[in-house]
Image: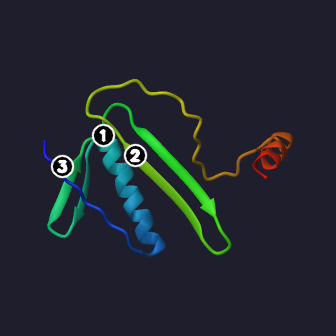
Amino acid sequence: MSKKEISYKGRVEYEKAIEYLEELVKGLKSGTVYLQSEQEYIELSPGKTVMIEASASQKKDKEKFSLELSWYLTEADGEDIGLKISTTKPEIDEEVEAEAKEGSE
């Protein structure tokens, strides 16, 4: 199979970003995700397990959340990576949080 690639970077309204994410979820659930830029497109079919890379950062006037999904078309076993993405604020043990802050200074 030859390599195909589509890449995009740009600003969109908040609601449009949500639409893209909702379509991504629908595609993942159905087993096929299409990404199109002008007259080019890629059809992706996620494998049984998915590699997830997530990061988040905050600066004075900018926040960033990055999510990368990748998979092989051959089967592999999944594992619990301990990542949680939620709409509710996590309950963190204050002692553990204080130790983590001390360790990062």
Q: Are marks 3 and 2 in contact (CB under 8 Å)?
A: no
Q: Which mark is residue 3?
A: 3
Q: Amino acid at mark 2?
A: Leu
Q: CA distance from mark 2 to mark 1?
A: 9 Å
- Dot 1: few (<14), some (14–19), or many (≥20) neighbours within 10 Å? many
Q: CA distance from mark 3 to mark 2?
A: 17 Å
Q: Secondary structure at mark 3?
A: loop
Q: CA distance from mark 1 to mark 3?
A: 16 Å
In the rendered structure, which disc, 2 or 1, sits on the residue that comes first in sequence? 1
> Relative to residue 49, is residue 54 drawn left or right?
right
Where is the N terminus found, in terms of image quarters?
A: top left
Picture coordinates of residue 73 (x, y %)? Answer: 26, 34
In the rendered structure, which disc, 1 or 3, sits on the residue that comes first in sequence? 3
Residue drawn 23% across the image and 62% down it: 36
Q: Viewer-proximal residue, 65 or 88?
A: 65
> Relative to residue 76, is residue 13 drawn left or right?
right
Q: Which residue is mark 1?
A: 46
Residue drawn 37% across the image and 69% down it: 9
Picture coordinates of residue 28 (x, y %)? Answer: 34, 45
In the rendered structure, which disc, 3 or 2, sits on the residue that comes first in sequence? 3
> Relative to residue 49, is residue 63 drawn left or right?
right
Residue drawn 57% across the image and 47% down it: 85
Q: Amino acid at mark 3?
A: Lys
Q: Secondary structure at mark 1?
A: loop
- Dot 3: few (<14), some (14–19), or many (≥20) neighbours within 10 Å? few
Q: Secondary structure at mark 2?
A: strand
Q: Which mark is residue 69?
A: 2
- Dot 2: few (<14), some (14–19), or many (≥20) neighbours within 10 Å? few
